[in-house]
Image: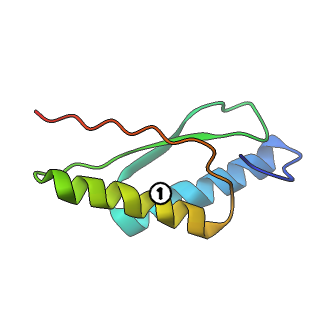
Amino acid sequence: MLHGVSSLKEKRHIVKKIVERTKNRFNASVAEVEKNDIKQSAVIGFTVLGNNSSFVNSTVDKIIDFVEGMCLADIVETEIEIIAV
């Protein structure tokens, strides 16, 4: 949830910061995946790959904490899906 955003330009600026900083810090694939045209809301998805499930879980938790720590948006809901092949 993005508070105080009055335009899509402001939203894109915030989302870009979150996406780029997360990509750089964790070497993960990160993108806005839904609600592109809604000003106060964003859905950001990310992918972490690894051969150890505890590593993947730990990295997912760190990414969520990192995004919360940026204080650019409030995380309202998280959905985690781990696929083992």
Give me the residue at 57% from left, 58% from top.
Answer: 18
Give the percent coordinates (x, y) of residue 37.
73, 30
Image position of 43 (left or right of 28): right
Give the percent coordinates (x, y) of residue 81.
33, 35
Picture layout, residue 43 above or below residue 34: below
Give me the residue at 49% from left, 66% from top.
Answer: 66
Note whether residue 23 is visible. Answer: no
Dot 1: element: helix
| Residue 80 image-quadrant placement | top left
| Residue 71 image-quadrant placement | bottom right
Note whether residue 12 is visible. Answer: yes
Determine which residue is flagged by label 1: 64
Q: Quadrant of the C terminus?
A: top left
Image position of 42 (left or right of 59): right
Give me the residue at 36% from left, 54% from top.
Answer: 60
Name the residue type under label 1. Ile
Picture layout, residue 23 above or below residue 76: below
